[in-house]
Image (tube, grey):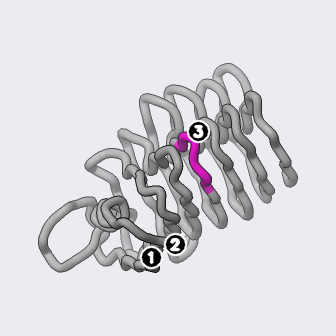
Amino acid sequence: MLTTFNVTQPLDIVASDGLVSLREAIQEVNSLPAGPHTINIADFPQDLDLTQGVLSITTPESVRIVGPGTNQQTIYSAASSIFEIGPGATVSIEGLTLTGKTAGDGGAIRSSASDLTIEHVAFRNNDAAGNGGAIFSDGGNLTISNSTFAVNKAVNGGAVYVDGGSLTASFPFIFDNEATANGGGIFLKDVTAAISGS
């Protein structure tokens, strides 16, 4: 059964107030037995600032997260990745700007053995103390299209780090990313990859 959640609360809270935050929508999706599910994020006049840590998606059902556009809505986290995609999950994210910072891997997104599709997303100023300044993908399948990566930083894979699984990517723009070790833009390890673009 298709379930749609409309995010109507820009604050990162869980409360019985009649409004729906992004965290509340993801918690609901994780608890539902059937999908696919869609989470629509409104065009708020402020960033969605995560103050309660990473948003974990654990459901095996398909989840689609849809923002109003990269120029309209940013999700920001100063102390954690934004999204953590659990094993077996199938997730697509589109129409957002993501800016995160983590002491681990994946400044914006950390994905493990999942099917993750990224479309029309801008990754800007993400910072990982580990690997994958914007995206860290460990196994599974990662697909990226029509998305930009700028000024992201990590040890390996300033923008994207992929270890195992597959990567299919078309990059219109990937620039000014930095790795202190290897792969200023992209770092691949034991990956089946098809990459095009700049």
Residue 84 picture location, percent across and down: 45, 46
Q: Which mark is residue 88?
A: none
- On the rendered structure, is 132 left or right of 146? left
- On the rendered structure, is 165 left or right of 172? left
Label 2 crowd (10 A; few <14 / some 14-19 / many >=20)? some
Residue 99 picture location, percent across and down: 49, 50
In this rendering, the count of numbered labels is 3
**Type of amino acid under label 1:** Asn
Q: Which mark is residue 136?
A: 3
Residue 76 picture location, percent across and down: 42, 54
Residue at image point 50% right, 44% down: 87
Q: Nearer the viewer, residue 32 or 149?
A: 32
Residue 54 picture location, percent across and down: 37, 46
**Type of amino acid under label 2:** Val
The image quadrant that residue 95 belongs to is bottom right
The image quadrant that residue 101 belongs to is top left
Q: Which residue is mark 2?
A: 66
Marks 1 and 2: CB-CB under 8 Å? yes
Residue at image point 41% right, 78% down: 3
Residue at image point 49% right, 65% down: 63
* Residue extent of the magenta highlight: 111-116
The image quadrant that residue 186 belongs to is top right
The answer for how far apart the CA atoms under marks 1 and 3 are is 24 Å
Q: Which residue is mark 1?
A: 40
Q: Say which label, 3 or 2, has the lower sequence index.
A: 2
